[in-house]
Amino acid sequence: MTISRTPLASPAKAGVPETAHAETGSLPTGPAPAAWRFTGWHMLGILSAFFGLVIVVNVVMARLALGTFSGEVVENSYVASQAFNSWLASANADRALGWQTALTAANGTLTVTLRDHDGHALAGAALTAIASHPLGDPVQRDLRFAETAPGTYAAPLPAGRWLIHLTATAQGHRWRNMAEVSEEPK
């Protein structure tokens, strides 16, 4: 077996002197430039920048999330758990009455239609409600209703998305309902 070696052509044989500058043809006067090397410091900088950016984005997103909704539904969950069975009994009593409501929001007015289990209008009922935004603004509004027709009640309510906690008292019974209404601002 024979291995042949072919010598590589030097730059001088290709017409370019080995030590001449390519553009000017002059000889370099200083030391040769060092080749750039990727070191551990470069990797440390890249990793620090990447994880720093991730941490900054996470902090910003967490602050925005907590600023819009804290996730708190009740102030004290232990106290709420003690009242849970009474809330269930109250909800079952409300369901047994069979009353029905229809809530509509239009032209800055919340209209509630209240009917008994047979579908007859419940005239002369005393209605109260608390309106709050489902997310964000913690301000609640107390609504006072006036009967506009038998079984139909109205209260002023600005446009927007609202969660309505309604309480109706009629025929010796107290009934609670919760519903969401919305009216687009004009």
Image (cartoon, rainbow, N blue to C red):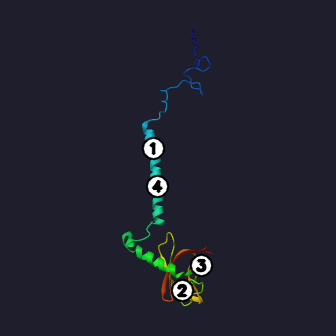
* Rendered view: 51 above or below 23: below
Of 21 and 139, nearer the camera is: 139
| Mark number displayed over residue 47 | 1
Q: Residues within 10 Å of mark 4 (few under 14, many from 20)?
A: few
Cα–Cα gap, marks 4 and 3:
38 Å
Distance of label 1 from label 4 (alpha carbons): 16 Å
Mark 2 or 1, nearer chain start: 1
The mark that comes first in sequence, 4 or 2, is 4
Viewport quadrant of the C terminus: bottom right
Between 44 and 91, the one lying in front of the other is 91
Residue drawn at point x = 45 percent, y = 48 percent: 51
Q: Nearer the viewer, mark 1 or mark 4?
A: 4
Question: In front: mark 3 or mark 1?
Answer: 3
4 vs 3, front mark = 3
Is residue 89 in sight in this rendering? yes
Amino acid carrying mark 1 in the image: Leu
Which dot marks residue 138?
none
Q: Mark 1: few, some, or many residues within 10 Å (few <14, many ≥20)? A: few
Q: Mark 3, residues whose alpha carbon is within 10 Å: few (<14), some, or many (≥20)?
A: many
* Residue pointed to by mark 2: 145
What is the C-alpha distance between the residues marked 2 and 1? Answer: 62 Å
Residue 160 screen position, x and y as percent: 57, 74
Which label number is shown at residue 58? 4
Q: Secondary structure at mark 1?
A: helix
In primary-sequence order, the first of circles 3 and 1 is 1
Q: Secondary structure at mark 2?
A: loop
Question: 52 or 127, which is in the foreground?
Answer: 127
Circle 3 is placed at which residue position? Answer: 105
First reached walking from the N terminus: tag 4 or tag 3: 4
- Percent x, y of residue 131: 51, 78
